[in-house]
Amino acid sequence: MSTEMTIIKHIFYFLSTGLLLFGLLPGIFSCETENCITLAENDLMISFYEQDSTTLKDMIFEYVTAEGTDSVFYDYRTKQTDFRFPVNPADDQTLFVMQVVDTVTYDTLSHDPLVIEATFHLRDRIDSLLIEYQRSQRIITEECGVEINYTHLVVKKCTFPGYEFEDDMTFLSRLNEVNIKIYD
Amino acid sequence: MKLILKYTISLWLLLVAMGEGIAQKKAERWIPSAVRVGGSLGSLGYLIFSEKHNYFESIVDVDFDRYFAVFEIGNSSYRLNEDTYNYTNSGRFMRLGFDVNFMQDEKHLNVVFFGLRYAWSSFQDDLSYNTVAVIESETQWPDTREEVSNLEAGAHWYEMNTGLKVRVYNNFYMGFTARYKFLMKAHHDSSLRSYYIPGFGKNINSDSWGLNYYIYYRIPFRKKMYFEKSEKTNKK
């Protein structure tokens, strides 16, 4: 067999064996899933409780907003015990600012019997809650894109009478677990 | 009686001499016969066809009997340009290890090998992204462009390798190496978890596989033991 033929034969064997492996290996070893499942989110879960009590407290806010945004996260139309306060994804801290509605009175002697006018009595002070956290970024896959995880939550300022973190919930997740109990 | 003693001593001396010869030959097999230097062929394909990944690898091996000490060094760049984020990564990597040749004394000095490597890399990467486009649902915050960078990131991993090196012409060889990699540790100096590790691949799972094609040139210092045996046989 001529030298040229030997060279061609060797190159052919080499390439074909490599291509066979190249075709098989992805099937054998590929475990990379492309599903875009993430537990990351930027909502701080807060439950309100009666002061020095384990009783949940319904809260109405005239507004809940945060420094750095014009968005109003909640207003007087919401009355509930659990709230989602979205932290700033572009900063390592968020200052939430809110005004609590202490009481609501209803005018049942209105001229129009079908309309009951409500009067919201606002708390004298503006309340605030300053949260610090650590962000970590990663690309899940090229198709799924970027996720940000928020961990090491710390309350730096709270004007409410008391607060406490739920056990080990110093990170944000989609598990709907409460992060902070606030006593009011 | 004297004759028996004479023959016994002679036989004993002959056996000792033969034993020393065999031991010497065995020892000689451990003396390196050549250095083989190579470069990655697959990187040419990436250079031509891939917009997101480029790399180049060099490889050096030295034979010790049926074993090869192997050193590999390379550099790599990786970039993703998506609508909502851009990612760039560039760095270097090195691998050090050994191969066992299962085709010892093959006349063309072809190699079919299994080997182990310890590998490490150092790199920089950068991610810029739109905050509203992260995978979380509604952030309820205005969209901003954020950027985060690792200036001194690194990783360590182990590899199990297998492949072959085939002589194609004179001292030119071609070959491929299939690699199965186990990430030991990846470290970074910012809040960004690196998506890509030069030499390892995507940092999604703790294991990864790869296939590299190489072209080699073998620089011999001396004749391999196989040829010395053949020549003696031929002389007889």
Image (cartoon, coloured by chain):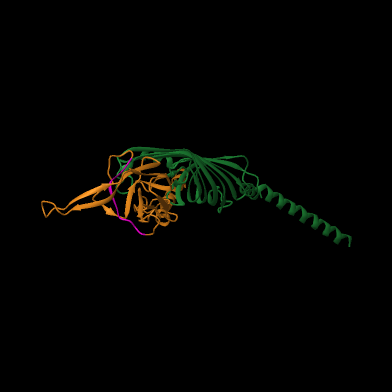
Chain colours: A orange, B green
Find the magenta span and give its range: A55-66
* Magenta-drawn stretch, dominant element (helix, strand or loop): strand
State the image coordinates of residue B77 (x, y, percent, origin top left): 43, 38
Report if residue B81 is visible in the image: no
Q: Is residue B144 above or below residue A105?
A: above
Q: Nearer the viewer, residue A122 or B212?
A: A122
From the viewer's perspective, is B222 left or right of B15? left
Is A64 magenta? The answer is yes
Farthest bottom residue? B1
Q: Is residue B193 magenta?
A: no
Q: Please tell me which residue lies in front, A35 or B17.
A: A35
- x%, y% of residue B11? 79, 58
Q: Position of residue B42 (x, y in %)?
A: 43, 42
Question: Where residue B212 sits in the image (x, y, percent)?
Answer: 46, 46
Say which of B149 and B200 sits in front: B149
Q: Residue furthest right?
A: B2
- Nearest the viewer among B72 and A21 is B72
Tell me which residue sits at (39%, 58%) in the image.
Answer: A53
Outermost left residue: A112
